[in-house]
Image (cartoon, rainbow, N blue to C red):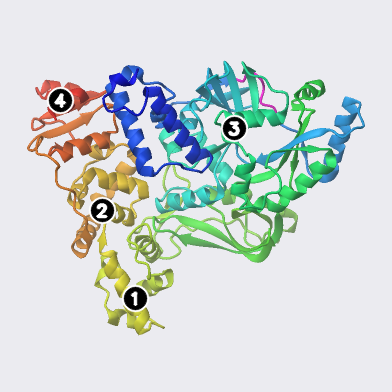
Amino acid sequence: MKSKMFDDMSEFQDLEALRDKIREHDHNYYVLDRPTISDKEYDRLFSLLIDLERKFPEFLTPDSPTQRVGGRPMDKFEKIAHRTPMLSLQNTYNTEDLFDFDKRVKKFLETSKEVEYFCELKFDGLAIELIYESGILISALTRGDGTVGENVFGNVKTIKSVPLKLKTNNPPKLLEARGEILILKNDFLQMNEQLQEAGEVTFANPRNAAAGTIRQLDPKIASQRPLKLFSYSVGKVEGISFETQDEIEKTLMDLGLPGLGVSEFEKIVSGKAKNDLGTVVSGIDEVIEYYNYINSIRHDLPFDIDGIVVKLNNLILQDRLGFVARSPRWATAAKFAPEQGQTVIENIAVQVGRTGALTPVAIMTPVKVGGVTITNATLHNQDEISRKDVRVGDHVIIQRAGDVIPEIVSVIFDRRPKNSVPFILPKNCPVCGSKSVLIEGEAVTRCLNSLCEARLKESIKHFVGRRAMNIEKMGDKIIEALVDAGLIKSFSDIYKLTKEDFFKLERQGEKSVSNLLESIEKSRGTTLSRLIYALGIRFVGEQTAKDLASHYKTLENFLETSEDELLSIEGIGPKVAVTVTTELKSKTFVKEVKSLDKQLRLETAPKPESTKLVGKTFLITGTLPIKRDDAKGIIEKNGGKIVSSVSKNLDYLVVGDDPGSKLEKANSLGIKILSWSDLENLL
């Protein structure tokens, strides 16, 4: 694999050197948050690697950075026994319990001297075990029951901060690295916002989101979620030895696994650090000091924790203490007291979203929790209300779920009013009066009336949003006033508004109206992806809109698509295909989109770079060495046309691995079959 094999690879000795270079940049970017090259330069290196692996597939390895893409959906997860059990820790809930833990340790060790402990954060995520053989990641197991876990390797390898190959020239024969998978608070809020905008069910807290994502059977879903990993211990190890807990964690970081070193701590808490997030202390007094300190800064951390973990630092002493039942004697989890409050549910309001989702929201007597005054909390859906049996008038315990969003923990049933009745979502939309429907297989009740005023208002708010049409000056109150006044009944009505229309609203001055009109005018120049996203088609988020725009190039092509063609686009699944085609069958929807097309200035697709394939039609089936959309882009750049089905008018069928029934049909029609190499030769 020396460089003489590759004419365009003079700066690297071999393929593995290129992979190592990319791994190093991945580590700098995703683990250390310190990129050392530009995105453009990184993309160049990554594209070079893809190109070389395509030319020389015999040298493709499973640990290559190109192999992080989500694989095929699975029917179920394989259950695998842990070589050493993933035990749970005994919990303590106050500093007195920590003193008792220290007394038990000293008594067992028969010493009165201060004991050296290793203290670290207790993450509120999903425990995971990464199994490396000779430095290569081969599987990833959940905790399961502690003895047997589920192999979620397909999902875990999509996490960019998880090294597929350890960062060492002398890897251990076996390393079982254990840690926690979680989602950062800001990432969680952004992800929930995107799910809501796409009409999908949101998560209650970051932990549920991380756990739910890892247990998805389709790795493509995991690849789209902002998962992170932090490592903190090991299971069975061969070919490497440790003397202390501190040494384990430092070694894991040296091997490229994300941890919580001093530099990471300083970055995370913006200079507030006086200790490492994982640190060695001497004696129980220093443990208590660490506990109190972390408790004081827990809200500054970008992820959720619910306490600290205290371990004997010396591994020989850990072995001496051993285990009791299913927990180690040498470690304990010191949890923080949950920040909760009590309040009363004054009412349960039902909000209607742009996709028609009816969301119950508890309106409560204001209460302070963790320094934040809380008045509202979402109850998600009828199943959640029934499970907790939440009613108007109830006294409830509330907390900020994962320090992020308000959550009703439980009802204080002995304080429930005698005239209390269960809350049931209305059978009719509370805004337009149309019948509300719980669609089979979903948890959300919906209003299906597309003309519902509430749906219109929320749809317009989405349409003008920053990542959609970006009409900056049109805020929620203006939108609600315009709809209430009957001045806008559709997206295209926005572009028909005049100065006189705005003056019909209350408290609109000359300058504010001028700014509004200027903002509307500016938004006319936009991209196809922004427009598709702005239309608010259910399940079509920002990235999906980009994928659709990249494939179709023009609005006309998009409006003429079929379900089969949609399913041929990488990343587009059955749910999206069905909702898009359902909308396109609506004459009202298509008429509105065409009306918008006349109002806007959409960027046009670039002209072909060559005419080598002009007049020829192509269809791709199976898995190619590059992404399907990239392959289609190459064909289109050279003047070729992509079609969605096999017919006698098809010139070429480009075939990859696992081609399916399209190959058989093409053969029966005598259509010319091309491999990817054949197509390259044609070009």
Residue 681 disc label: 4
Residues drawn in magenta: 81-87
Identify which amino acid the numbered label 1 is placed on: Asn
- Which residue position is annotated with label 1? 515
Identify which amino acid the numbered label 4 is placed on: Asn
Residue 420 horizontal side relative to residue 524, left or right: right
Is the residue marked by circle 1 packed among few (<14), some (14-19), or many (20+) residues within 10 Å?
some
Identify which amino acid the numbered label 2 is placed on: Leu
Q: Are marks 3 and 2 in contact (CB under 8 Å)?
A: no
- Which residue position is annotated with label 2? 528
Residue 414 horizontal side relative to residue 346, left or right: right
Lower position in the chain sequence, tag 1 or tag 3: 3
Q: Position of residue 427 (x, y in %)?
A: 46, 57
- Which residue position is annotated with label 3? 253
The Cα–Cα distance between marks 2 and 4, rounded to whole angstroms, is 33 Å
Lower position in the chain sequence, tag 3 or tag 2: 3
The Cα–Cα distance between marks 1 and 3, rounded to whole angstroms, is 52 Å
Lower position in the chain sequence, tag 4 or tag 1: 1
**What residue lies at 43% left-to-right and 65% top-to-bottom?**
431
- Residue 478's image quarter? bottom left
